[in-house]
């Protein structure tokens, strides 16, 4: 798969060289081939560390929102769910999209840490692991990925499609994207539309599996299911810390706010319900919360389920149109200073 | 410039990998290190906020010298000169054994190695110990005698392979959360879970069986379980026959045990004891996980030996999913023991009394011999100060004024010293009593190796330069040694060079080097050769000592029992977001806010009897002292028992605790103290 790494690396190098961006944030090699860490690249030389394997251990959009320089131009290599999170962060004024050049990688699913983070590339119906190609067994995918129906990065400036033979196709979605490809002297490929039928069928099937049973339960039993899951919670704040929609500098879950009691483990249900109310309408089902949960609580299932219920009600699709604001928790900085707004 | 530096969490022995985000030379945040085998991209709250104390305004940045009653800043040169003079003088006047040193389980292997070398070579005494004495000294002695190796036999990552997990005396979800993750995983994959604990700890909520034993009755419980196993013929006869010795002696003791008696002593119903025996003995692979609920007793070694008995009786050792797994508390307490920061053991658990081994270490250091008499342990050091035998003390990164039992006694001792040096990041309660305080660098400011509880040796990486004039402990020790004219053995340009030396004298580490250790998974000892892959599971074919040894252990009551004057049993423990004496977590705003103050848990029945209201202020007293704290009336504790977390100096449980210790391990009985309680 080195060729696709190379094209993305080329794009990054060119963006830096052409001074389109000051810095690029992407996943790359850390200590060894399978150690994948976020890199902040300012020197073209380091672009060779960038990898495009199907593994995505944290939200780069959130990293940029928290630690990126607001007035710097930043390049980002991300997957569609994170690209959608980036849009949601922009709606909440946490990033300035005008300063961001995003390179999106078409994605049919990623694996989780601990499952097998070696050289794994996932394609619509095959998987390559350490060079060996096998039919895709869906259970290697992270649970949120099985439910995903947004494989194509339509919301990024540049879209990259990796092909099983090691090749790759590149397209520009925006003018910024065209500038990037020009700088890299890459001809825009006329990317054939991806046949989404099978992938959407997969998503529907897994949604039915993940949510169906819960929905069939009586409300009381469903509550019991979640209460039992939350019994395991150690209040590590990992789910919140990993979630790109949880951007607040001052979070309502913290002890000072006196909404969720401290000195109690597991925390009361409000800890989870509070976050649910805050992010449920915009959850991009990126799965980062669940991947960060030490106790294996299926966190993204909960958030995504609520999102799925709210989305048609409000006709709100999170992560696409910058102009449509989240329906329930339009927590702008201003709203945050009002008390109680978000928890009733 | 912005980059993530992979390194190791400075809190518990689970040893999770973290990534420190360093932006323009400053640590900005901590995130999980996905590729690390312990956390696999997850952390507990301590891990997520491990960076918070680094820039605390309380950090010491200059050496301090006590002048009159207050401290004055001084230069390194002067501070080291003063210390070198005082130490040399004390050594010349009262002999090397009048000095005592505390090393630190929070420091790296290299630092612990160097300090014990300094103590043995430059001072010429074996008076070196550290807080491992307070947590797992009895593991080292107990498992050492039974198996030949006093460490966790399996690994955290191995727990999900188990069919029955027996957790005894460990509040795993609070104290080793990323080990608890694997217990929950095992449970969800169908394993049975037994939890033995006087409190309804969070893990107990998932237990198939919660044995609420009275504190200090572990041996009675374990003997009861073993008796029941024998009664039903569930023992593994082939394993006993082929791989162990001493079974007859154990059996003789078990023959005298009755389950009714066990029920009476432990408070655990006989039926539950039998159920536990069945679950543990008849599952395909059963493991035992334990912590200080087992070790911190006057019978600590016996408790550990009983656990070893149980594992051997059923052949649950040496295979995946089995084993005897002490969860070590401090991030590097395994390493500090491995490095010989102990009064009777040289690096690699080689006895100072074993002439051949001692001489080999001496030879490696270019010396004819080393001190031959075992030195004093932590509690004995305090006694020796009171007796006027120890007059000078040097403490690296420990805070005995809060962490040790009977702290009134400890304070008196430290005040009595002629000269005290403390090396720390903060002016701790102990540092305040010092004559010279040396500012130490934090975990983010130095390099070295830490050995986690699964015997996993891993590299700590430097993320930023030491703050102010603070220095990594290894540098300080090196400079001090040179100030005392010990040039040769103490010139190291980096921790890596120290490691190259220490692996020559520590057989378990012989095959390790920084290149291999730098991989995310590190290496698990023993790793005897450079091409050896490390050892995830101990005792697979035979025990380290050859045959596993059973010990006949009759039940013995704790040193203190409740009586008319002190009618309740106090047991101590910890809360999730605080660490030991809070010198780090108390300065981490996010962590401190979760559990900001001390409390005492008391059962509603006892609360009624002693007229205690929930949240009311109470006075708790023992034979040694009294404290004021707030009550929490809860059925989390069984009647007759109260529980206080040990962290809070304002309401220090260790004002009350007993320093009576286990005769072999010299570990004090922090888990059982007779106390009285009344509204304040
Ligand atoms: S709630 Fe979970 S799945 Fe949803 S956006 Fe946040 S991290 Fe992603
Ligand atoms: S206040 Fe709500 S949305 Fe903001 S970080 Fe906290 S839980 Fe997330
Ligand atoms: S990540 Fe899991 S354990 Fe941690 S706070 Fe969230 S739900 Fe609780
Ligand atoms: S479990 Fe232990 S090592 Fe892991 S993050 Fe928590 S305190 Fe650190």
Image (cartoon, rainbow, N blue to C red):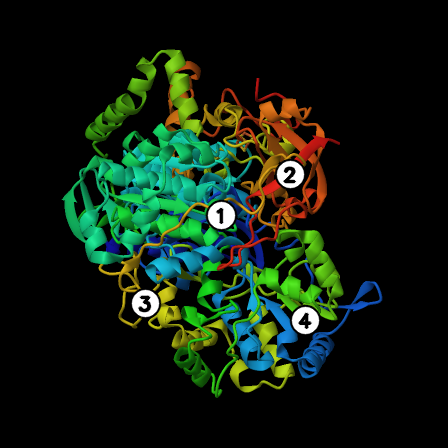
Q: CA distance from mark 3 to mark 1?
A: 28 Å
Instruction: Indicate which label's residue lies in the foreground, 4 or 1.
Output: 4
Instruction: Indicate which label's residue lies in the foreground, 3 or 1.
Output: 1
Q: Which residue is mark 2?
A: B675
Q: Secondary structure at mark 2?
A: strand
Q: CA distance from mark 4 to mark 1?
A: 31 Å
Q: Which residue is mark 3?
A: B527
Q: Which residue is mark 1?
A: B292
Residue A155, above or below B424: above
Instruction: Indicate which label's residue lies in the foreground, 4 or 3.
Output: 4
**Quadrant that contains the C terminus of chain A:** top right
The answer to whether dots 4 and 2 both sit on one chain is: yes
Sequence order check: which comes first, mark 2 or mark 3?
3
Residue B107 seen in the figure: yes
Q: Which residue is mark 4?
A: B389
Instruction: Indicate which label's residue lies in the foreground, 2 or 3.
Output: 2
Q: Position of residue B107 (x, y in %)?
A: 54, 63
The subunit letter for the residue under badge 4 reads B
Q: CA distance from mark 4 to mark 3?
A: 40 Å
Q: Is residue B71 left or right of residue A269?
A: right
The one of B310 and B426 positioned closer to us in this rendering? B310
């Amino acid at each position: 798969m080195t060729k696709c790494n190379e094209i993305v690396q080329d794009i990054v190098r060119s963006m830096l060289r052409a001074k389109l961006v000051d810095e690029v944030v992407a996943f790359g090699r850390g200590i060894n081939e399978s150690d994948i860490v976020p890199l902040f690249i300012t020197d073209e030389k380091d672009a060779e560390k960038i990898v495009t394997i199907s593994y995505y251990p944290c939200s780069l959009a959130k990293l940029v929102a928290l630690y990126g320089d607001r007035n710097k131009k930043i390049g980002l290599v991300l997957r569609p769910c994170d690209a959608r999170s980036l849009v949601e962060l922009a709606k909440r004024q946490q990033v300035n999209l005008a300063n961001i050049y995003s390179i999106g990688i078409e994605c049919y699913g990623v694996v989780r840490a601990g499952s097998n983070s070696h050289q794994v590339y996932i394609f619509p119906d095959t998987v390559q692991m350490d060079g060996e190609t096998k039919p895709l067994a869906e259970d290697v995918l992270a649970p949120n990925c099985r439910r995903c129906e947004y494989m194509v990065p339509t919301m990024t400036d540049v879209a990259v499609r990796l092909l099983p033979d090691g090749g790759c196709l590149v397209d520009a979605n925006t003018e910024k994207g065209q500038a990037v490809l020009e700088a890299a002297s890459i001809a825009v490929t006329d990317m054939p539309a991806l046949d989404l039928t099978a992938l959407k069928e997969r998503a529907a099937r897994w949604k039915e599996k993940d949510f169906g049973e819960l929905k069939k339960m009586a409300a009381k039993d469903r509550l019991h299911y979640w209460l039992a899951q939350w019994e395991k919670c150690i209040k590590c704040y990992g789910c919140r810390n990993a979630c790109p929609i949880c951007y607040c500098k001052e979070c309502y879950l913290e002890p000072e706010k006196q909404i969720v009691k401290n000195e109690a483990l597991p925390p009361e249900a409000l800890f989870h319900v509070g976050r649910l109310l805050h992010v449920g309408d915009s959850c991009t089902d990126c799965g980062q919360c669940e991947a960060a949960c030490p106790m294996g609580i299926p966190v993204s299932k909960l958030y995504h389920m609520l999102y799925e219920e709210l989305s048609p009600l409000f006709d709100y699709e999170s992560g696409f149109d910058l102009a449509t604001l989240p329906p329930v928790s339009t927590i702008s900085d201003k709203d945050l200073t009002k008390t109680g707004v978000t928890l009733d | 410039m912005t980059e993530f530096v992979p390194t190791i969490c400075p809190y518990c022995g689970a040893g999770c990998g973290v990534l420190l985000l360093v932006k323009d030379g400053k640590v900005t945040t901590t995130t999980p290190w996905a590729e690390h085998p312990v956390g696999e991209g997850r952390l507990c709250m301590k891990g997520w906020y491990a960076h918070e104390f680094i820039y605390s305004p309380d950090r010491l940045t200059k050496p301090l010298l006590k002048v009159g009653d207050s401290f004055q800043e001084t230069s390194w040169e002067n501070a080291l000169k003063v210390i070198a003079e005082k130490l040399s003088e004390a050594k010349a006047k009262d002999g090397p054994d009048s000095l005592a040193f505390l090393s630190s389980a929070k420091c790296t292997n290299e630092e612990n190695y160097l300090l014990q070398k300094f103590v043995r070579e430059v001072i010429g005494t074996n008076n070196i110990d550290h807080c491992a004495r307070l947590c797992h000294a009895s593991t080292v002695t107990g498992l050492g005698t039974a198996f030949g190796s006093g460490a966790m036999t399996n690994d955290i990552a191995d727990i999900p392979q188990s069919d029955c997990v027996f957790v005894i005396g460990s509040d795993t979800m609070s104290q080793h959360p990323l080990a608890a993750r694997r217990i929950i995983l095992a449970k969800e994959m169908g394993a049975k879970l037994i939890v033995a604990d006087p409190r309804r700890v969070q893990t107990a909520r998932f237990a198939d069986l919660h044995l609420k034993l009275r504190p200090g009755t572990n041996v009675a419980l374990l003997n009861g379980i073993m008796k029941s196993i024998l009664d039903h013929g569930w023992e593994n006869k082939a394993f006993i026959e082929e791989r162990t010795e001493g079974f007859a002696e154990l059996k003789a003791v078990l023959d005298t045990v009755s389950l009714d008696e066990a029920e009476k002593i432990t408070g655990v119903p006989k039926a539950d004891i039998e159920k536990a025996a069945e679950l543990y003995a008849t599952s395909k692979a059963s493991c035992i996980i334990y912590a200080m609920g087992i070790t911190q007793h006057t019978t600590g070694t016996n408790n550990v030996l009983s656990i070893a008995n149980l594992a051997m009786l059923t052949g649950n050792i040496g295979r995946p999913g089995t084993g005897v797994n002490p969860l070590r508390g401090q991030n590097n307490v395994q390493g500090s023991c491995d490095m010989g920061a102990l009064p009777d053991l040289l690096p690699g658990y080689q006895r100072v009394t074993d002439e051949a081994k001692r001489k080999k270490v001496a030879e490696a250091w270019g010396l004819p011999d080393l001190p031959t008499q075992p030195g004093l342990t932590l509690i004995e050091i305090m006694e020796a100060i009171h007796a006027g035998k120890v007059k000078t003390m040097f403490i690296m990164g420990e805070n005995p004024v809060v962490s040790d039992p009977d702290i009134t006694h400890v304070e008196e001792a430290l005040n009595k010293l002629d000269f005290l040096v403390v090396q720390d990041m903060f002016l701790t309660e102990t540092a305040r009593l010092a004559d010279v305080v040396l500012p130490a660098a934090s975990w983010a400011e130095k390099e070295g190796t830490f050995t986690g509880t699964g015997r996993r040796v891993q590299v700590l990486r430097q993320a930023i330069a030491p703050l102010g004039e603070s220095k990594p402990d290894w540098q300080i020790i090196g400079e001090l040694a040179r100030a005392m004219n010990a040039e040769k053995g103490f010139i190291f340009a980096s921790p890596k060079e120290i490691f190259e030396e220490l692996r020559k004298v520590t057989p378990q580490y012989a095959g390790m080097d920084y290149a291999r250790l730098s991989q995310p998974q590190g290496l698990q000892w023993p790793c005897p050769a450079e091409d050896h892959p490390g050892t995830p599971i101990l005792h697979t074919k035979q025990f380290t000592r050859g045959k596993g040894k059973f010990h006949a252990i009759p039940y013995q009551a704790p040193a203190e029992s409740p009586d008319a004057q002190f009618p309740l049993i106090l047991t101590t423990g910890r809360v999730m977001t605080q660490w030991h004496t809070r010198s780090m977590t108390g300065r981490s705003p996010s962590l401190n806010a979760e559990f900001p103050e001390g409390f005492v848990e008391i059962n509603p029945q006892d609360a009624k009897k002693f007229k205690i209201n929930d949240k009311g202020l109470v006075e708790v007293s023992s034979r040694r002292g009294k404290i004021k704290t707030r009550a929490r009336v809860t059925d989390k504790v069984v009647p007759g028992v109260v529980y206080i977390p040990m962290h809070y100096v304002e309401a220090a449980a260790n004002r009350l605790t007993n320093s009576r210790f286990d005769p072999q391990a010299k570990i004090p009985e922090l888990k059982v103290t007779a106390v009285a309680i009344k509204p304040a």
